Amino acid sequence: MAENLEIKELDQVVVRFSGDSGDGMQLAGNIFSTVSATVGNGISTFPDYPADIRAPQGSLTGVSGFQVAIGAGKVFTPGDLCDVLVAMNAAALKTQLVYSKPNATIIIDTDAFGPKDLEKAQFQTQDYLGELGIDPDRVVACPITQMVKDCLADTGMDNKSMLKCRNMFAVGLVCWLFSRDLDVAFNFLREKFGKKPAVAEANVKVIQAGYDYGHNTHSSAMNVYRVETKNKVPGRYMDITGNKATAYGFIAAAEKAGLKLYLGSYPITPATDVLHELSKHKSLGVTTVQCEDEIAGCASSLGASFAGALAVTSTSGPGICLKSEAMNLAVIMELPLVVLDVQRGGPATGLPTKSEQTDLLQVLFGRNGESPMPVLAATSPTDCFDTAYTASKMALEHMTPVVVLTDAFVANGSGAFKLPNLAEYPDIKPPYVPAEMKDKWAPYLRDADSLVRYWAVPGREGFQHILGGLEKDNKTGAISTNPENHDLMTRLRQEKINRIAVPDLEVLGDADDADLLIVGFGGTFGHLHAAMDEMRAKGMKVALAHFKYINPLPKNTAEVLLKYKKTIVAEQNMGQLAAYLRMKVDGFVPRQFNQVKGQPFVVRELVEAFEETIKN
C-alpha cells in the first residue's frame, strides 16, 4: 500500500525531463516547477533546447531537456546532476544519462525503444541498458505510449493528438514521486488550453493516469520524496522565467513613472519571449512593434523616447552589433533608452539556444567615439524583474541609454517569484524641464549636481527643440565643431554616468578573513554561491563578490578587490570582466576561471578549481 512506502525527506531534489524536441519536455518541466513553486518550494530551472531548428525525430541532436531543482529553502542552481531522469525515447536516454547521478531513478517509455529507435540513437545492440552500464533495478520501464492511447481511447482523439499527451503521463508519475497535489497542474492546463477544453481535459486525464500508475505499481526503482518548505516569506508565489520577469519589470517601471511603455524589437533567440510577453499587455499601456531589422527596432524606440515614453529595445549579441549606431545616437542625444541584451553563444550565429557571458566588452565599448552608458547584469531569473525596473529608473532619471545584460540560462530558466508590492518600490522621477525655464531653455542645459540634462517632451509650448547625431554646443544646443566644446561635452557625458549612485559591492561568506575571494557577474551568481557554500561546509574560508552594477562600478570596488590575498574571477567568456577590472582597479591581478561551453557552470568543477587556487 502507498501508506507503507518509505518516504525520503530531502532538502533538495533535481528532476530532468528529456525527449524529442516535439515531446513537450519544456511544458512538462514548467508544470512540475509551477506545482512546486506554488507550494512554497524554492526552485531553479534550466531548459536545454537543441540548437537545430528541427532535427530528425529520434536523433541524438534533437533531444530537448528541462532540468528543475526543488528545495526546502532557497535554490541557487538547477543542480549539476539529477536524482530523477525522465527519458521519453532512446536518444534522450543516451544523451542525457551523463546529467544523472549514479543512483538516479530513470523513467523510460519502453514503447520508444524499438529497433528503429535504437538505430536512430546509434545503439549497437538491443541491450541498451547494458550498453550504457545502467542497473535495471533503478529503471522504471513503462509502456507510456500505449497507456496514454488506452487512457484516451474513448475521447475520439486521433493518434497524433493522443501522442502529444505522452509528456503529461511523465508529469503525473513525477508528481506522485514527490507527493504533489495535482490540482495546481490541472488548473495550469485548463488555463493554458482555455480555448480548447477537450485538449485540456485529455491532458488532465493523462496526468491522473500517470499519478495512478505510480501509486498502484510501487516499482522498486522508485523512491518517494518529500521536500518540505522551510523559512518561506509569506506571500503569493509563481514560477516565472527570466524573460517574463524582465517584461514585468519594464511594465512596473512605466506604471511607476506614469509613462507609456514602448518596445521596438526584432525577433532573435533567446530574447524573443520578451517581445511576445509585452505584446499581450496593451491594456496596461504597452506598445510593441516588431520592426524589419535590429537598427529599426532601436531607432524606433529612440523616437518613442523623444516623444516621452519609457522606451525599450530587446535583442541578443548579434543584434547589439546592429543596434550600436542607434545606441550611439541615444548617447549623444542623451535620451532615456533601455537596451536588453539576452546573451547567447557566439560569434556570429554561434549557438542560438545556448548561454554565454561574451557580450560584456561589446556593451561597454562597442560603439564609435567616447560613448559611455550604464551596464547592469541580472543575477537570476527572478532578479530580472528588479534589474529591469532599476535600469528603467536609471535611464529615465539620468537621461541616458542603459544596457541590461541577461543570458539564455537566466532568461529561459525560472525561479519561485514572490509577487511584488509596487508601492514598496522607489519612485521614478524623470527630470522634466521646469516651467519657469520657458523660452530660456536649451536642450543641453543641465542640473548642476547630477549633470543630467532637462527633458522637454514635444508639445510643451515654449520648449521647441531639435536633437541629432552631430555634436551640439553646451549652452545653445546648436551644431558645434569647436574643439573645446567637443572635449567638454565628452567629459560631461562621462561624468554624468560616473555620478550615478549604485549600491556598494556586497561580500558574502567569510567577508573578513577569506583565503579566497570569488568574483563574478550576472547569471553565474547561483553557481558561484553554491560553490562557495560547499567549500565553506568543508571548513574553508571563502567569500564571494558578485557584480550586478558594472558601469559605473560600485564605489568600494577597489577596496574589496584588493583586500584579499587570492582572488579568482569566474566567467563564461575568455576573461572580459577580469580585463575590465584590471583596467579600472590599479594593482588588481586576479586568477581566472573561464569556460565558453554554452552550458551553465558545473558546481563540482568550480569547487575543484577554487580549491586548487587556495592550495597554490
Image: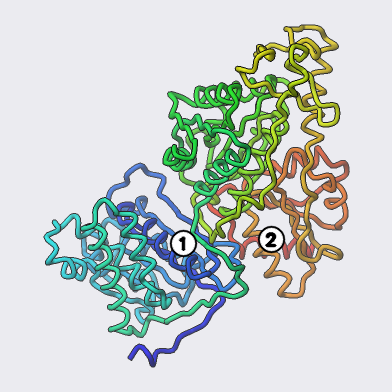
Label whose residue precedes the other's in the sequence (2 or 1)? 1
- Residue 528's place in the image compared with 384, above or below, is below
Q: Residue at x 36, y 70 (%)?
A: 183
- In the picture, measured across the screen, residue 239 lies left or right of residue 186, that is right
- In the picture, measured across the screen, residue 32 lies left or right of residue 467, that is left
Q: Position of residue 27 (x, y in %)?
A: 37, 57
**Taking the image as drawn, is residue 587 in sight?**
yes
Tag shown at residue 609: 2
Q: Position of residue 161 (x, y in %)?
A: 19, 55
Choose between 74 and 395: the one closer to the eye.
395
Q: Position of residue 225 (x, y in %)?
A: 46, 80
Choose between 584 and 592: the one closer to the eye.
584
Quarter of the image for the C terminus: give it. bottom right
Q: Which mark lies nearer to you, 2 or 1? A: 1
- In the picture, measured across the screen, residue 248 lies left or right of residue 336, that is left
Number of other residues with Cα within 10 Å of mark 2, as a class: few under 14, some 14 to 19, many 20 or more: some
Quadrant hosting residue 394: top right
**Residue at image mark 1:** 67
**Helix, strand, or loop for circle 2?**
helix
**Helix, strand, or loop for circle 1?**
strand
For badge 1, the amino acid type reads: Gln
Q: Residue at x 36, y 64 (%)?
A: 93
